[in-house]
Amino acid sequence: MDNPAGPLSCRPQHARHTSSSTRPPSIFADTLAQAFLGERAEELLGYHRSYGGHPVLSGARATAVTRSRYTEDRLAEPASRGVDQYVILGAGLDSFAYGSELADGMRVFEVDKPTTQHWKRALLVETGTTVPPSAFFVPGRLREGVRPVTCRSPRAGRL
């Protein structure tokens, strides 16, 4: 299913994640990236493997992987002290809630545009990815501001 905000617009980012995490030593492992890439996974990954040294591709890959790794490393310390909520603004195809050991026992709120969330939910179903009960989808357009959301039940905002 194509992203209604633009066909395959987020998938190259996941190609960057996957191409970075498949060669040891791994800086960051995105276990869902290849599944999210769908039928074009090999094509997109092959492109990144073949031309990954290009300054634009290597810079984009370094930014995406470093941002994810840095964020999760910074989250580990407060999580060890009992912080049990994590908000991801502009979540897109972020896969933290679906595979990170750090996400166990933590409520993860994914904030993004409703169309992007709808697309992601369809991809999760399409790839057979189970949405953990601790993952919540919070619709919002960041440029317009996100209104406070009150979840009336633990399942509010879920698939």
Image: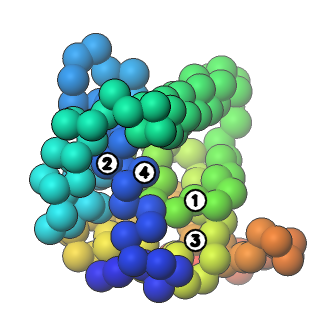
Q: Quadrant of residue 73?
A: top right
| Amino acid on which disc 1 is placed | Ala
Does the image show residue 132? no
Secondary structure of the residue carrying numbered label 1? loop
Q: Is residue 100 left or right of residue 114?
A: left
What residue would you read off at disc 3? 137
Does the image show residue 151? yes
- Alpha-carbon span between mark 3 and mark 1: 9 Å
Quarter of the picture holding the N terminus = bottom left
- Alpha-carbon span between mark 2 and mark 3: 24 Å
Q: Which label's residue is closer to the chain start, 2 or 3? A: 2
| Amino acid on which disc 2 is placed | Ala
Q: Which mark is residue 13?
A: 4
- Residue 140: x and y, percent? 72, 76
- Residue 26: x and y, percent? 31, 21
Secondary structure of the residue carrying numbered label 4? helix
Do callouts 4 and 2 mark residues in contact (Cβ within 8 Å)? yes
Q: Which label's residue is closer to the chain start, 1 or 2? A: 2
What residue would you read off at disc 2? 15
Decide: is 9 above or below 113.
above
Do callouts 1 and 2 mark residues in contact (Cβ within 8 Å)? no
Question: Mark 2 against mark 3, which lies toward the viewer?
Answer: 2
Name the residue rendered at 57%, 59% in the picture. Answer: 91
Question: Mark 1 against mark 4, which lies toward the viewer?
Answer: 4
- Alpha-carbon span between mark 1 and mark 2: 16 Å
Name the residue rendered at 42%, 72% in the picture. Answer: 120
- Alpha-carbon span between mark 4 and mark 2: 5 Å
| Amino acid on which disc 4 is placed | Gln
How many numbered dots are placed on residues in this image? 4
Secondary structure of the residue carrying numbered label 3? strand
Secondary structure of the residue carrying numbered label 2? helix
